[in-house]
Image: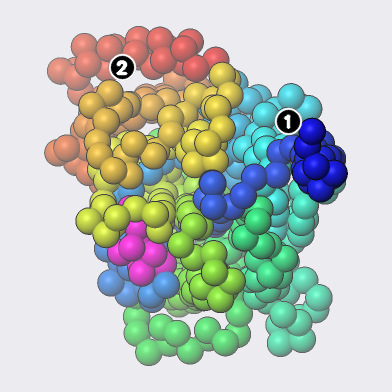
Amino acid sequence: MPSTTFKSACLCLFLLTYFLPSKIVAAADRPNIIFILTDDQRWDSLGCMGNDIIQTPAIDKLSREGVTFENMFCTTSICAVSRATFMTGQYARRHGINDFRTSYTPEQLDNSFPMQLRENGYRTGMIGKWGIGGKLPVDRYDYWKGFPGQSKYFPNGPQGASQHLTEIMRNQSLEFLEGCNEEQPFMLQLYSKAAHCQDGDPWPFQPDPKYNSMYSDIEIPAPPLASEDQFHRLPEFLKTSEARTRWHVRFENPELFQKSIKDYYRLIAGLDETVAAIRKKLDEKGFAENTVIIYTSDNGFYLGDRGLAGKWYMHEESIRLPLIIFDPRLPENERNMRRSEMVLNIDISPTIFDLAGLPIPAKVQGKSLLPLLKHGDPNWRDSFVYEHRVPIKTIPESEGLRTKRWSYVRYVETDPPTEQLFDLEADPMEENDLAVLPAMQPLLNRFRNALDQEISEIE
């Protein structure tokens, strides 16, 4: 007969197993994940992406110690739609969020990576710009500091009288990490407002005053495409679009350009400080060796290129993003790597599922990037569909097909649609539209058919 002591021990073990939450998993079994999503940060606004003026030492260090993707794109270049794509891993034609009012369906929210990770034992946090319509999912996170809309860079008063929003969010991130422990893995979404402008304000880019001296003693060159010649190459309806209207208030003359570009860079300096602070806290808490950091942006941004501001259209400066994935578990010889594969915002959701050891939902259209952290994938995509069908009167709707060599776009509100075709191999800055050339009509027709086919496959 078992002893009374042995029976008591068995009973205690049974009770602990039965009554403790079944889905709490040890952090050692799965990595912690920090997903940093910045706003309107184009791919070349980091030192590690070839910008020799901007000062981003902490993010550059993350790049040197991780994997940097040189060809990361968004499938729709506007905040709400792109954020929905990050969350669902789906093209806009599938997730259906094409404005700032539409909310996730209950099914979409339930199957998104933060909800699934929490359901499977992760402690979850959301800080910053939620960016999607409908009720905020405050009760669906363990730690919630999200906000609707754009908020303000100085939410509690004028400059100098209140903390800068980036600092507030940095402190919230540290508070979240302070509440974590080694017994439970965590996942934090840090969705910054920076480097988005303050819409409707005569001072569009509003950095923390402590960065005001940065770049004050230099003149930043205008982008190569910031010329009247490039502006006049645009279709007529883009010359009067919202992107041109915003150019007037941000970049119209050299003095305004210098002020805006320097403040834009200063906002990114605040993001860099946040990355440094988070990594320091991870070290202090003993989480550094098991925490994956993903750093990217929701869309690109025109910094006066082509006489435009904003995003929305299919030019490289609008759709190309930075992406760094730092996984401390990778061996040293697989760090400081750069990947040239064409990766998309639809790929972040399946990557996070894969990192957490969870099955990727069937409706996800992206691909996990984990295989690319270690080696190439011969079956990786060589094209993607771009779509911007957001019904805003001053922003022409467009769709297109991007391959490694070609960029084909059609603006769908003219009759017939206005088409453009660029050979990125010969013309990487998309200066010469080939759609007008008679000799290119057979190729143009092939792109029309290919785009129609790919659209039918992603719906």
Residue at x 81% of width, y 75% of height: 156
In the rendered structure, find residue 242 and report the number of the disc placed on it. none
Q: Is the magenta stretch mostly helix, strand or loop?
A: helix
Per the image, label 2 sits on a secondary structure element best described as helix
Q: Is residue 90 above or below residue 129?
A: above
Q: Nearer the viewer, residue 411 or 359?
A: 359
| Residue 85 pos. (x, y %) | 57, 35
- 329 displayed left or right of 421: right
Q: Residues within 10 Å of mark 1 (few under 14, many from 20)?
A: some
| Residue 220 pos. (x, y %) | 35, 75
Per the image, label 1 sits on a secondary structure element best described as helix
Q: How crowded is mark 2: few (under 14 residues within 10 Å), some or many (20 or more)?
A: many
- The residue type indicated by label 1 comes to Asp
- 45 displayed left or right of 250: left
| Residue 315 pos. (x, y %) | 38, 42
Residue 374: quadrant of the picture: top left
User: Residue under circle 2?
Assistant: 447
Q: Residue furthest front?
A: 1
Residue at x 65% of width, y 66% of height: 177
**Which quarter of the rendered picture does the C terminus lie within?**
top right
Residue at x 23% of width, y 26% of height: 378
User: Residue under circle 1?
Assistant: 110
Q: Which of marks 2 and 1 is nearer the N terminus?
A: 1
Q: Which of 9 and 3 is in front in this view?
A: 3
Q: Can residue 334 be seen in this view?
A: yes
The magenta region covers 59-68
Residue at x 77% of width, y 71% of height: 155
